[in-house]
Image (cartoon, rainbow, N blue to C red):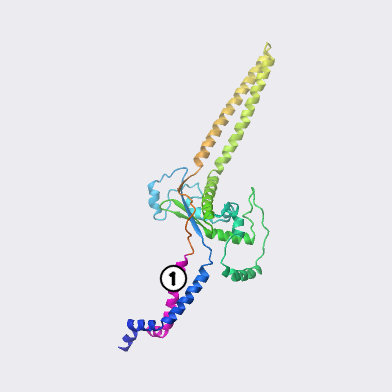
Amino acid sequence: MEEKKKNVIDLRELTKTLWSRKKLFMKVWVITFILSCVWILPQPRYYTTTVSIAPESAEGNAAGGLASIAANFGLDIGRNASDAIYPQLYPDLMSSTEFLVGLLDIQVTTKDGEVSTDYYTYLAEYQKKNYLTYPLKWLMNRIKSLFKTEQEEIPGKDGKRFDPFRLSYSTTQLLKGVQKSVDCIYSRTTDVVTITVTDQDPLVSAVLADSIKAHLQDFITDYRTKKARIDYEYYKQLTADAKAEYDKACRDYALYADAHQNALLQTVRTQLSDMEYEMQMKHEIYSAMTTREQGALAELQARTPVFTTLTNATVPVKPAGPKRMIFVAAMLFLATLGTMVYLFRKELREWF
């Protein structure tokens, strides 16, 4: 019987004990509230922008609705075998260093108009931080500086600022922050790609979301049409060369014919016949190359993927966080729970 009595919780006794220690709870709540506010209020606000697109295959999906049913079971039977980058890999693609480096040159402007620069400079020089974390970050940076070796950065190609192959330590750390603020989710059931961008400024968040969407579309389009573009440029050059040859043959024939209008010599007639035949051959080659060029252009158009924008980027009105009231309420709840555990520590040992 004594064992059972020990395991029975007397709610009246519990309430009486808690009420008798109400001053302790008041002190704990006041201290917790002040410390929570001191910590959470300096935390910078951040805003979130979401865009969603539906990538459409340029070659169509022969499997039709069967592919959608199979997607529910984690299977993909509709993907084109010649396409190495399909929508399921878009999240991995967006987290790659090469893709992230391409974002650093995006021009951004804050909502108040005070900052207008590239994304790299914005992240490196204009990010707000909680001043309470300065001492800890300074100490951590000092410790890391003892072990890290800063390597020289290589300028990027085609006017880009950085080369993904070789980045400095500071740029690598900055890219890790970009990777955390940019999220990409692919839905197997709906084939929708959702891109979410988080930033301290609402306008920067919206501009980045729209720019990343365009950057992703350009990246995929460039990949899928690379061979078709090479073929088109090749046939375009051949067509230009064939036209130049045909135009030259026409000019040579016309000049020779004008110079020998009244000539009756058989050699002149034979030369004119040969030049006319050569001109016709050049014309046939030019016509064939024109047909090839038009075919390559059609193939380029067929290989170009189509992206349907489902949700456009809009400047967020309300911040996504930090949730200050929720944080303070959670801290008060934990402080209350901890105080109760402290008051009934002896009873808890007996119960458990």
Residue type marked 1: Ala
| Residue 181 picture location, percent across and down | 53, 59
Decide if residue 8 is in sight here.
no
From the viewer's perspective, tell me whether residue 59 is left or right of residue 293.
left
What percent of the width, then of the height, locates residue 126?
60, 59
Residue bounds of the magenta highlight:
323-352
**Which residue is at 65% across, 68% downward?**
145
* Residue at the spot 60% in from the left edge and 69% down from the top edge: 134
Q: Is residue 324 left or right of residue 235?
A: left
Residue to which mark 1 is pinned? 329
Asked if the magenta segment contains residue 331, the reply would be yes
Residue 258 lies, with reference to residue 145, above or below; the image says above
Q: Between 121 and 290, which is closer to the camera in this rendering?
A: 121
Query: In the displayed structure, would residue 166 be above or below residue 2?
Result: above
Residue drawn 62% across the image and 23% down it = 279
User: 125 above or below 245?
Assistant: below
How crowded is the residue under tag 1: few (<14 C-alpha within 10 Å), some, or many (20+)? some
